[in-house]
Image (cartoon, grey):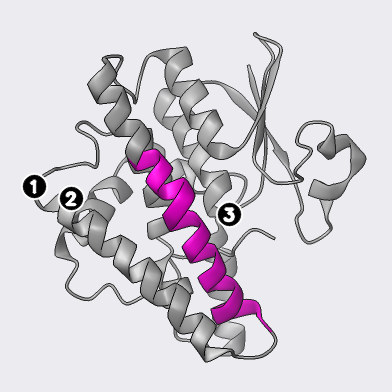
């Protein structure tokens, strides 16, 4: 059994989507980021970095933090969503690291300065939105001749999709990125992906209420950034 400690963020959804795709049984433990549950001693014993998600595989008595490490572990545990041959595995790992080193950090910083910083620092907003757009263009180029990022649907697609789908909340321009749009829509139709992005809650509904309250006109297919 997998014990999942998570919150409704792109990184949290990476793991819940993978668990749904792999059809692994799991229990959900909600970590309230606003109340700093992730900084409490009991959580820091599981992840000294104080970030969600964390999984515990009770069958193997192993605790894993870092969402990318969790995706690799779950794929290797089940023999699914990642090839076993050296070339195929390497390709999946490259696009997974692309998300972890590029898409996630750049979109995360975009959210901070575009959405949450008390003052608008336009050069910072421009820097992170433009870099996120550049990374999107890299993906769009790859997807021109490939259905998915690394051959068949894999953990690389899950990791990148859980972030890219939130582009509107980050204010990132996706005009002209037709291949990326096709890929986003294709993955969004997968039942396991649809379910995974409602664990522990469907943040889209919560964002819709916030948008209506503040009269904001933004795409509600987006998520709040992890603190």
- Residue picked out by circle 1: 145
> Which region of the structure is painted magenta?
95-117
Q: Is residue 110 above or below residue 74?
A: below
Residue name at image x 55 percent, y 68 percent: 109
- What distance separates the C-alpha of mark 1 from that of mark 3? 30 Å
Q: Position of residue 25 (x, y in %)?
A: 56, 21
Measured from the top left, where is residue 18 in percent x and y? 45, 33
Quickly name the residue at label 2.
142
Task: Quarter of the image for the N terminus: give it.
Answer: top right
Say above or below: 121 vs 147.
below
Q: Mark 2 to mark 1: distance in Å?
A: 6 Å
Are the residues flagged by discs 2 and 1 in contact, CB closer than 8 Å? yes
Q: Name the residue under label 3.
A: 9
The one of 171 and 92 positioned closer to us in this rendering: 92
Evaluate if marks 3 and 2 touch, with contact meaning CB atoms under 8 Å apart.
no
Q: What element carries label 2?
A: helix
Q: Residue at x 30, y 67 (%)?
A: 134
Q: Is residue 124 visible?
A: yes
Left or right placement of residue 74 versus residue 38 in this view: left
* Image-quadrant location for residue 121: bottom right
> Is residue 200 toward the left or the right of residue 93 in the image?
right
Q: Which residue is drawn at 64% across and 58% down?
A: 226
Residue 96: % across, % down: 39, 40
Foreground: 29 or 120?
A: 120
Q: Left or right? Give the position of 9 relative to 84.
A: right
């Amino acid at each position: 059994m997998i014990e999942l400690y998570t919150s409704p963020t792109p990184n949290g959804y990476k793991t819940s989507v993978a668990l749904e795709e792999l059809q692994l049984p799991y229990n959900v433990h909600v970590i309230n980021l606003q109340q700093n549950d992730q900084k409490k001693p009991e959580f820091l014993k599981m992840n000294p970095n104080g970030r969600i998600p964390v999984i515990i595989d009770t069958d193997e008595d192993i605790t894993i933090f870092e969402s990318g490490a969790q995706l690799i572990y779950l794929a290797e545990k089940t023999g699914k969503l990642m090839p076993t041959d050296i070339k195929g595995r390497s390709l999946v790992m490259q696009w997974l690291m692309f998300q972890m080193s590029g898409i996630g950090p750049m979109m995360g910083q975009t959210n901070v300065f575009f959405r949450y910083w008390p003052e608008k620092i336009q050069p910072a907003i421009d820097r992170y939105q433009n870099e996120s757009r550049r990374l999107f263009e890299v993906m769009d180029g790859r997807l021109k001749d490939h259905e998915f990022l690394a051959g068949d649907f894999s953990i690389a697609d899950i990791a990148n999709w859980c972030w890219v789908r939130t582009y509107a909340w980050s204010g990132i321009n996706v005009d002209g990125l037709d291949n990326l749009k096709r890929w986003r829509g294709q993955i969004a139709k997968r039942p396991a992906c649809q379910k995974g992005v409602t664990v522990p809650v469907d943040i889209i509904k919560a964002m819709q209420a916030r948008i209506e309250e503040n009269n904001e006109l933004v795409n509600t297919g987006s998520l709040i950034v992890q603190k």
